[in-house]
Amino acid sequence: MHELAFAEEIFHCVEREARRHNAVKIRRVRLQVGQYSGVDPASLSFCLEAISAGTIMDGAAIEMMESRPEWICSTCGGFPGDSEALSACPNCGGALEYSAATDLRVQEIELDDDDNQT
Amino acid sequence: MTTTIKLEEKVKTKGQEVAEELKIYFRERGIYVINLIGSPGSGKTSLLESLAPDLRGRTAVIEGDLQTDKDKLRIERAGLPAYQLNTLGACHLDAKMIRQAVDEFSLEGAKILFIENVGNLVCPASFVIGEDVKVAVVSVTEGDDKPAKYPTAIRVSSAMVITKMDLLPYTDCHVDQMEADAHAINPQMKIFKTSMKTGEGMKEFLAWIEESAAAK
């Protein structure tokens, strides 16, 4: 029931990036939705569609990836997988942190910029 | 030209930002905040009434309900200062409501603040309102399947208070099942089996509150 509040913040984030890159159109927004973020993906989609109507984000494809609780390397951001037994990242030796999958993140945005201005 | 912008930006609602401000506000004043969640009629207000004699003089209560100041009056009669929030239909308290409450309600001398959320085992679980911990209140009369059926409330709560233990012989509730289900979802969860009528389990729950508040 707080999906609208999240949708508004996602929209602000996308709009800010659009301005920064002189975008004329947002093609795709990729979100990472934590399994325990309390966000319902269907409801979030609905809210995003509703508030994007008539804006630069109108018609953008919304991709949602669910993230699960896991160990993540704090240095390289890698996913060493099932690594409770590991004390350091096998890729770079960085410290491992437990991610409880409570976050909602904007991972990436694909946009068309205005070639005349850049 | 089409460009892909990598962000990895955490999205925070205004409510989450206000909750973080509230956490700082409470920390600066040394107030330990407990967000009490549970179904309507699970015994949240009765639990506070039972704790009142032991917590008087250092505890304040913010009450959340759709309508009326009935709970505020009950808490005041029990001897604790109370402030009533009416959500006028909303199913949970949010951080902005708590900020409004602390603007108007003096927390002078309070070391512990209880926020009794709107009676609802679903929505309040998804909102942080500046609390240190959530405590879920579940009564034996609701049935032993409630922790399993409402896992979010169990996952986000540090403790579960099972109430109305005096009524257990009249129900088909298996408290062992309730505990096992809760621990499967949240292995660290503290569980207190209580009755406001007999006082069962209240000494233990009070001790846990004192210990947690002192550790802040």
Image (cartoon, coloured by chain):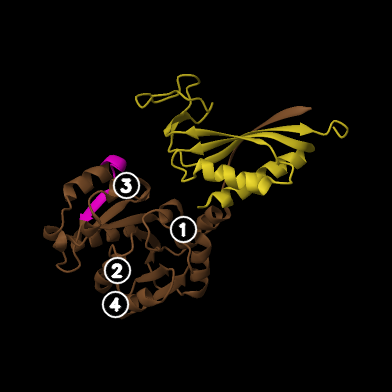
Residue A101 in view here:
yes
Q: CA distance from mark 2 to mark 1?
A: 19 Å
Q: Which residue is mark 4?
A: B78
Horizontal arrangement in the rendering, residue B94 relative to residue B4 (left or right): left
**Quarter of the image with the C terminus of chain A in it:** top right
Which chain is displayed in brown in the rendered image? B
Q: CA distance from mark 4 to mark 2?
A: 9 Å
Residue B186 is inside the magenta segment: yes
Q: CA distance from mark 3 to mark 2?
A: 25 Å
**Quadrant of the rendered image containing residue A55:** top right
Horizontal arrangement in the rendering, residue B32 relative to residue B148 (left or right): right
Q: Which residue is mark 1?
A: B130
Q: What is the chain letter for disc 4? A: B
Q: Closer to the observer: label 2 or label 1?
A: 2
Q: Which residue is mark 3?
A: B149
Q: Closer to the observer: label 1 or label 3?
A: 3
Q: Closer to the observer: label 4 or label 3?
A: 3
Pick whichever, A53 or A115, lies toward us. A53
**Mark 4 or mark 2, earlier in chain:** 2
Chain A drawn colour = yellow
Residue B79 is inside the magenta segment: no
Rendered location of residue A84, percent (x, y): 36, 27
- Kindly state the secondary structure of the residue where label 3 is placed: helix
Where residue B48 is drawn, which disc sits there? Answer: 2
